[in-house]
Image (tube, helix red, strand yellow):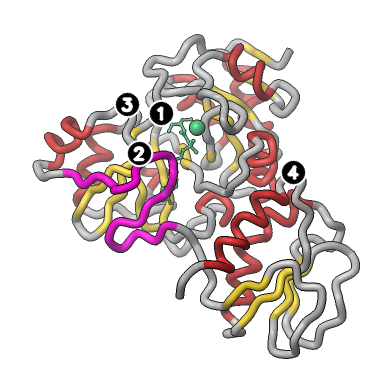
Amino acid sequence: MPIIAPIDTSIAEAGALLRAGKLVAFPTETVYGLGADATNGQAIAALFDAKGRPRFNPLIVHVASLADAQRYVTFDRLAARLAERFWPGPLTLVLPRRADADIADLVTAGLDTVAIRVPAHPVALALLRAAAVPVAAPSANRSGHVSATTAAHVADDLEAKVALILDGGATLHGLESTVVAISEGMATILRSGAVTAEAIEAAIGQPILRSLEGGDRPQSPGQLASHYAPKAGVRMNATSLNLSEALLAFGPAPPRHSGPVFNLSPTGDLIEAAANLFAALRALDQLGVAMIAVMPIPENGLGEAINDRLRRAAIKGR
Ligand code: TXA
Ligand code: MG
C-alpha cells in the first residue's frame, strides 16, 4: 500500500520520486492532486495515461511561491493583485507563458499560457519545496470519476499507477480551485471553484467575466486561444504521401519520404509519442508546409488522446 504519512522523510522521498519522473499523489486544500514533474514531458504523458484521460486538457502547474511562479509566467497588475490576495490558496491563474519557461508542451497542451497556482496545504507546499520542480497536478482520480478528497479515494482509483500517496486526511474544500484567465486587463472565470466570483471582484474592484461555455475545458474569451492548432492542414491515417507534405510518423517503419519527417516514437511507444506531440507539430508547422500527413496511430491507451488532438487540428477552421 503506497499510502504514507507526510513526515519529513516521506516528503523528501516523494520529492525525489517526482524529480525521477514518477507520479506522486498529494493533498491540497481543494482535492488530492496526481503530481508529475512539469518539466518532464514523459512524466506528464505517463500522468495522462494513469488518469485515462481521452484528451490532452492543459494541466495546472503547482509551485511553492509567487517568486517561483514568476519563473514561468508573467504577471500584469491584475494578476499580481489576485496572486497577492489569494495565494497560497484555491485560485488558479491562466497567464502568459514566459518564452524561457521550462514547462513541457504537454502540460499546456501547446498553448502559450500556463495555468498556475500556489496551494495552501502545508503538505503540498512542503512537497513542492522538496521536489524543487514545478508540479503539474490534475485531480487524483481516473477520468470520469469524482475528484479524490481522501488518500483512500486516490488508492481506489490509482493505486497501481502512483509511486506514493501522501496522506493528509480529508481535503478542506472538496472542490477544485477557481480558474481565472487574465488577458488585456480583464479577468475571466474559466472554471468556478473554491474562490467565489464575488470575492474576486471585491479584490480587483472590477467585474469579472464568465466564460460562455464554462465547464472543465479551456475557453477562448478575447485573446485566449482555446487549443493549439498548427497553421498547416492535418491529414490523418496517411498511408501514402504527396511530395509537398510533411510526415508525422509513428513506429519503426515509416514510409519513405523525401520531405520533412518527424517520428513521434520510432519504437512505437505511445508515452514517448505523447510527450513529443506538440513539439513535433510546431517543428513541422514552422517549415511552412501546407499539409502534415499523419501515419495511423493506434487508438489504445494514450493513442486515443493523441488522435483526438490531431483530429481536432485536422477539422479546425482556418
Ligand atoms: O483544485 C485544483 O485545481 C486541483 C488541485 C489538484 O490543485 N487540480 C485540478 O486540475 O483540478 P485539473 O487538471 O483537473 O484542472 C485544470 C483546469 C481545467 O479546467 C483546464 O481546462 C484549465 O485548468 N486550464 C489549464 N491550463 C489552461 C490554460 N492554459 N488555459 C485555459 N485553461 C487551462
Ligand atoms: Mg478533475
Q: Residue at x 57, y 31 (%)?
A: 144
Mark 2 Cα-neighbour bin, 10 Å: few <14, some 14–19, many ≥20: many
Residue 154's image quarter? top right
Circle 4 sits on which residue?
301
Circle 3 sits on which residue?
194
The kind of residue tagged 2 is Arg
Circle 1 sits on which residue?
176
Mark number, residue 191: 2
Q: Residue at x 50, y 48 (%)?
A: 58
The kind of residue tagged 3 is Ala
Give the Cα distance between marks 4 and 2: 27 Å
Tell whether label 1 touches label 2 (CB within 8 Å): yes
Q: Is residue 250 above or below residue 10?
A: below
Q: Residue 98 at x, y = what percent?
A: 42, 60
Question: With 301 as the anchor, is 98 left or right in this view?
Answer: left
Question: With 157 as the anchor, is 221 left or right in this view?
Answer: left
Say which label, 2 or 1, has the lower sequence index. Answer: 1
| Of marks 1 and 4, the one in the foreground | 4
Q: Which residues are magenta?
A: 208-226
In the image, the residue with mark 1 has its CB under 8 Å from the nearest atom of ligand 1:
yes
